[in-house]
Amino acid sequence: HIPLLRGPVPLTHLLLRHFVRSGDRVVDATCGNGNDTLLLAELVGPTGKVWGFDIQREAVDGTARKLAAQGFEERVTLVAAGHETMAGQVEAGLSAVVFNLGYLPGGDRSVITRPETTGAALEQALGLLAPGGIVALTIYPGHRGGDAERRLVEEWAGQLPAPLFHAWRMGQTNVTADAPYVICVQKGA
Ligand code: SAM
């Protein structure tokens, strides 16, 4: 079975598989349907710790069910609040913080991540990263409000001083200009 690089999610997962180790502390800033939370819980193992955030009860409950089905609930703390509150709720020394922006697939499309709260959460995430830790963002410029959020993230990532941070844009070239893509910021060691 060959994993296909179809859309941004497999690329993000490849980065997470590389950078997240057993025993690590990590954050899923947007649990949604729980797919990233599940991978993170698998990667950190029984001695690691995952914090997952979502403002929609439906997303938090669905993620909790997914984790319970794998027996991962003890290593994950789910928070039914915005990721802009993460600084007060998680321990520092994170090896990864994952943002999958936009709306919940299959859910209410009017509930989207927003530039002000995303920006606040990104600032907090940088402060919480361990040296070598990454913030991995999947950006969806295509929906209403998506372009403003893309501009916010690009501006934020573009002004980070190197080599304190290594900020990368990773996008597929043979797709439309508004296709989702990945920004990955690593804190220098
Ligand atoms: N990673 C998810 C998955 O694997 O299914 C998809 C995430 S979905 C694209 C975006 C999620 O962000 C939605 O579930 C939405 O409720 C959530 N969200 C919106 N604003 C938020 C905020 N301020 N803090 C945390 N989550 C938020």
Image (cartoon, rainbow, N blue to C red):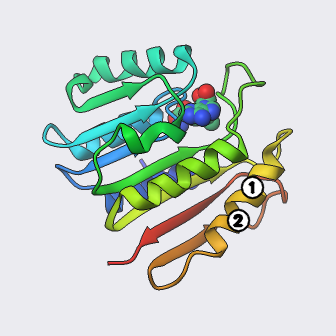
Circle 1: element type: helix
What mark, if any, has residue 150 been given in the picture? 1
Most extreme residue toward the bottom, as rendered? 163
- Kind of residue at disc 1: Arg
| The quarter of the picture showing ligand 1 | top right
Q: Relative to 25, does residue 161 appear above or below in the rendering?
A: below
Q: Is residue 118 left or right of residue 93?
A: right
Amino acid type, label 2: Glu
Q: Residue drawn at (45%, 61%), measured in percent from left and top?
A: 126
| Secondary structure type for disc 2 | helix
75 is higher (above) or lower (below) than 15: above
Tell me: residue 55, above or below residue 91.
above
In this rendering, the count of numbered labels is: 2
Return the x and y of residue 42 as percentages of the image width and height: 27, 39
Which residue is disc 2 drawn over? 154
Q: At x 86% / y 39%, what residue is drawn?
A: 144
**For residue 51, which numbered disc appears in the image?**
none
Question: Can you tell which quarter of the image residue 45 is in?
Answer: top left
